[in-house]
Amino acid sequence: MGRERIKPAKSMVSRSLLTYSNPYGTIAEQYRTIRNNIQYASRGRKMRSLLITSPSAQEGKSTAAINLAICMAQRGDRVLIIDVNFRNPTLHQIFGVQTSPGLSNVLGQQLDVREAIYGTEVEGLDILPSGQRFFNTTELLDSGLMSDVMHYASSNYDMILLDCPPVLGVAETNALVSKCDGVILLLGSGKTQLEQAKEAKRALLFAKANILGVILNKKSV
């Protein structure tokens, strides 16, 4: 029996699914450019998994991750976007699904990963919501169980995007760096301070992240 969908707020959907609702608009074109630039930055290496993060909260990284995922699906890729932000999950609200069961329940060995994945209204795009927050989420994300989730995803999807918590002050994000082919750092224009951006870059490099580039978000949503 499938889980019941929740009707998301229209304002939230219109902000977050711009590349779907208006695929010929300026914003959609900008995301397609970012999508293509990711492949250029990979220097010929096939990117199969991307971690999206920001220095702090409310800088727009979830919106960026969603629209980037949509652009990849519109290109014909089969895409899975995973909400790894247990502290402040967002994706389930955008796509109108329950937050739990989800990733944390899979890592807690309560169900198989296939039972926690939703299809979305965007053809080719699936979502794995965060699930409930456990006290030891950092250890779970750094475990072989998370590696198994990524292996399943890479075997069944062309691209996996991880919507992660802010990198500063949160251990979960760096625990996932080694499990992804590349990292995109999102900065909020007028919000992210220069020193925050530098500190976030240092933290990611310390974790040996393959930073592909930076997205400068003009409006924090």
Image (cartoon, rainbow, N blue to C red):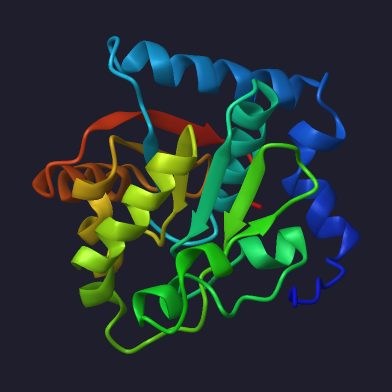
Q: Nearer the viewer, residue 15 or 45?
A: 45
Which residue extends farthest front?
1
Q: Quadrant of residue 117?
A: bottom right
Q: How far across and down, in percent of the image, does residue 188 sit?
A: 51, 44
Count the numbered circles shown.
Answer: 0
| Quadrant in the picture for the N terminus | bottom right
Q: Quadrant of residue 211?
A: top left
Residue at left 36%, top 82%?
108
Q: Is residue 192 visible?
A: no
Q: Nearer the viewer, residue 184 or 77?
A: 77
Left or right position of 140 against 81: left
Q: How far across and down, in percent of the image, does residue 13 sit?
A: 81, 53
Residue at left 43%, top 48%?
153
**63 is higher (above) or lower (below) than 101:** above
Q: Nearer the viewer, residue 20 or 159?
A: 159
Q: How far across and down, in percent of the image, does residue 123 sit?
A: 75, 37
Which residue extends farthest bottom?
135
Residue at left 31%, top 78%?
137
Q: Is residue 107 visible?
A: yes
Q: Nearer the viewer, residue 151 or 73?
A: 151
Residue at left 73%, top 59%?
94
Q: Quadrant of residue 219?
A: top right
Q: How far across and down, in percent of the image, does residue 124 sit?
A: 67, 37
